[in-house]
Image: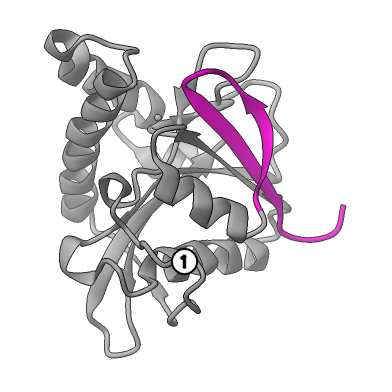
Amino acid sequence: MVRKLSISKPPSRRAPAYGANLLGKGRVCRDVTRAAPSVRLVSMTDAERDAALEQEAAEYAEAKARAGIWTRDEALNRSREEIRSLVGTRPADRGHEFFIGVDEAGRRVGWLWLGPVPSSDASPDTRWLFQIVVDAPRRGQGFGRGLLRAAEEHLRAAGRSELALNVFRWNTVAVALYTSSGYEIAFQDDKALEMRKRLRPA
């Protein structure tokens, strides 16, 4: 759902876009000051990616309906259509990456989705955080911050300079996490914020 959060697109001078970040429907980590545990990213299989996108479609639809952007009757179909328009049938060919996050013992903690910014005028060195989710049993342990940090490290290693995302205003847990992690508001409207962080010097 900022330049496109959620699926994450940006709010901005344009309509709010798909963007990141339900962070477990806003219940990822109540203690945003907690030190981040180590998280390692593992690429999803195609089957894992498809399951994650179906989960994402349902949660994105709920977020859009809650924000008053779509009606509940239309939300799920519109969510699926928007995701399909972003990733197509071969997401990797469009620059999308899907990862499962695992802890130091190799146990799953959640997943995330990175890709190109959904805007025609975006820099190719900027990536978009479409979604970051901490699995329900692992919430409240700092893994939201750990996943975010792992995403940033992955992008730095790939030579990317910036990570951007969209987050709904009502998701105060996610907003607090991003703010405390160094993200700044680039654009905003009454529904959502687009936030960005430089990953290396300009």
Q: Is residue 152 above or below residue 13?
A: below
Going by the image, does 187 lie left or right of 47?
A: right
Foreground of the two, 97 or 72: 72
Q: Which segment did they paint magenta?
A: 183-202
Q: Position of residue 61 (x, y in %)?
A: 23, 25
For label 1, count other residues whose C-alpha is less than 10 Å away and answer few (under 14), some (14-19) or many (20+).
many
Going by the image, does 99 lie left or right of 121?
A: left
Going by the image, does 201 lie left or right of 25?
A: right
Q: Which residue appears at 24% of the width and 49% of the height?
A: 49
Our reading of the magenta stretch's main secondary structure is strand
Q: Is residue 58 above or below residue 85?
A: below
Local secondary structure at mark 1: helix
Residue 31 in sight here: yes
Q: Which residue appears at 72% of the width and 35% of the height?
A: 123
194 inside magenta stretch: yes
Q: Is residue 196 above or below residue 200?
A: above
Q: Which residue appears at 16% of the width and 14% of the height?
A: 72
Residue 200 quadrant: bottom right
> Farthest residue in the right direction?
202
Q: Position of residue 146 (x, y in %)?
A: 45, 71
Q: Position of residue 76 (x, y in %)?
A: 17, 20
Q: Which residue appears at 56% of the width and 31% of the height?
A: 193
Residue bearing the label numbered 1: 145
Residue 70 quadrant: top left
117 inside magenta stretch: no
